[in-house]
């Protein structure tokens, strides 16, 4: 009897063991190896020559790295705000029991199923000066219309925002819609009886109730910002010049093209810090909520 109980209790743990080994070996092990390498004089091949924080000093003396951080900050603010606003509005629209709801959900969510490379190539063509959107509008008779952001150094990062917002807004819509469907319909009826305008109901009542959904969306979008690479490579290759350079591209270029493993590792560790800063409070909040729920149970 005791053996049977142990078998029942240990079977799930054994089933999860391969995944745990992968996480420990590939993710945590890889992160620790990268951290160690960032303190060495590694160039083409890893080196055991310890040089302290010299790689980090070189990293933050590099204008290209500083520009990439600036671009990432601008991109992150614009991308997260646009995705959350558009995704929430789409969710509210679909939540009105519109006809063809299933089709609309599929249409809005479909771009997220595409790879960032495909999205980048499509939007590269759409935003190319003289063709795409600019060419289509000019053929309509608006000869003076210009939409050359993709070749404009100060505006090119916003073309990446446009492409990735188009791709990610559907996911935000799906998560927000799931949250909206979990709200008691009686709240809407009571608000209508009190004569509260619909926009105030959603802004002051519904949106605060979507706290967990908003937190999840923010975390997913923030990690997507940090990982930004494919769309930039497909659309601009970091250009014109290095105007749309982002940290992930800087790291990959120094790792594979410039044979500077140490500097690339320092960049990767620096990029990991904001991810951990986002994940740690989220993980703590979830564990605390689970303990409270367990205590009430």
Image (cartoon, rainbow, N blue to C red):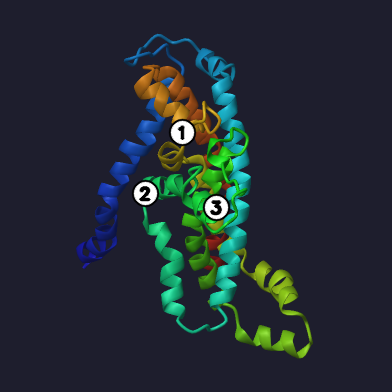
Mark drawn on residue 248:
1
Is disc 2 surrounded by few (<14), some (14 to 19) or many (20+) residues within 10 Å?
some
SS at badge 2:
helix
Instruction: State which mark lies toward you, 3 or 1.
Output: 3
C-beta proximity under 8 Å, tags 3 and 2: no
Q: Is residue 159 left or right of residue 41?
A: right
SS at badge 1:
helix
Residue at mark 3 to residue at mark 2: CA–CA distance: 26 Å
Residue at the image position 62 percent from the left and 40 percent from the top? 74
Instruction: State which mark lies toward you, 2 or 1.
Output: 2
Mark drawn on residue 138:
3
The relative height of residue 251 versus residue 120 in the rendered view (above or below) is above
Q: Check disc 2 and report the residue beneath it.
A: 118
Residue at the image position 38 percent from the left and 26 percent from the top? 33
Q: Earlier in the sequence, mark 3 or mark 1?
A: 3
Q: Earlier in the sequence, mark 3 or mark 2?
A: 2
Residue at the image position 48 percent from the left and 84 percent from the top? 99
Residue at mark 3 to residue at mark 1: CA–CA distance: 36 Å
Residue 151: x, y in percent? 54, 36
The residue nearer to you, when weighing 134 against 53, is: 134
Residue 19: x, y in percent? 29, 48
- Quarter of the image with the N terminus in it: bottom left
Residue at the image position 50 percent from the left and 56 percent from the top? 166
Residue 87: x, y in percent? 56, 63
Residue at mark 2 to residue at mark 1: CA–CA distance: 18 Å
């Amino acid at each position: 009897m005791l053996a049977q109980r142990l078998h029942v209790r240990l079977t799930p743990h054994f089933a999860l063991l391969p995944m745990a080994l992968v996480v420990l070996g590939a993710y945590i092990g890889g992160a620790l190896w990268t951290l160690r390498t960032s303190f060495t004089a590694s160039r083409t091949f890893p080196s055991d020559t310890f040089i302290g924080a010299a790689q980090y000093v070189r990293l933050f003396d590099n204008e290209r790295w500083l520009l990439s951080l600036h671009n990432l900050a601008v991109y992150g603010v614009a991308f997260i705000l646009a995705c959350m606003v558009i995704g929430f509005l789409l969710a509210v629209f679909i939540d009105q029991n519109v006809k063809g709801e299933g089709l609309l959900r599929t249409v809005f969510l479909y771009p997220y199923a595409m790879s960032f490379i495909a999205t980048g190539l499509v939007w590269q063509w759409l935003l190319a000066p003289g063709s795409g959107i600019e060419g289509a509008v000019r053929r309509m008779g608006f000869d003076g219309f210009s939409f050359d952001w993709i070749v404009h150094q100060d505006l090119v990062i916003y073309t990446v925002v446009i492409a990735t917002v188009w791709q990610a807004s559907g996911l935000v819509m799906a998560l927000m819609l799931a949250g909206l469907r979990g709200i008691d319909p009686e709240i809407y009826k009571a608000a209508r009886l009190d004569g509260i305008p619909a926009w105030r109901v959603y802004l002051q009542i519904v949106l605060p109730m979507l706290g967990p959904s908003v937190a999840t969306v923010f975390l997913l979008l923030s990690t997507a910002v940090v990982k930004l690479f494919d769309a930039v490579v497909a659309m601009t290759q970091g250009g014109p010049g290095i105007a749309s350079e982002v940290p992930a591209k800087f790291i990959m270029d120094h790792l594979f093209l410039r044979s500077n493993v140490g500097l690339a590792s320092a960049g990767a560790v620096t990029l990991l810090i904001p991810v951990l800063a986002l994940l740690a409070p989220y993980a703590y909040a979830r564990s605390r909520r689970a303990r409270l729920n367990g205590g009430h149970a």
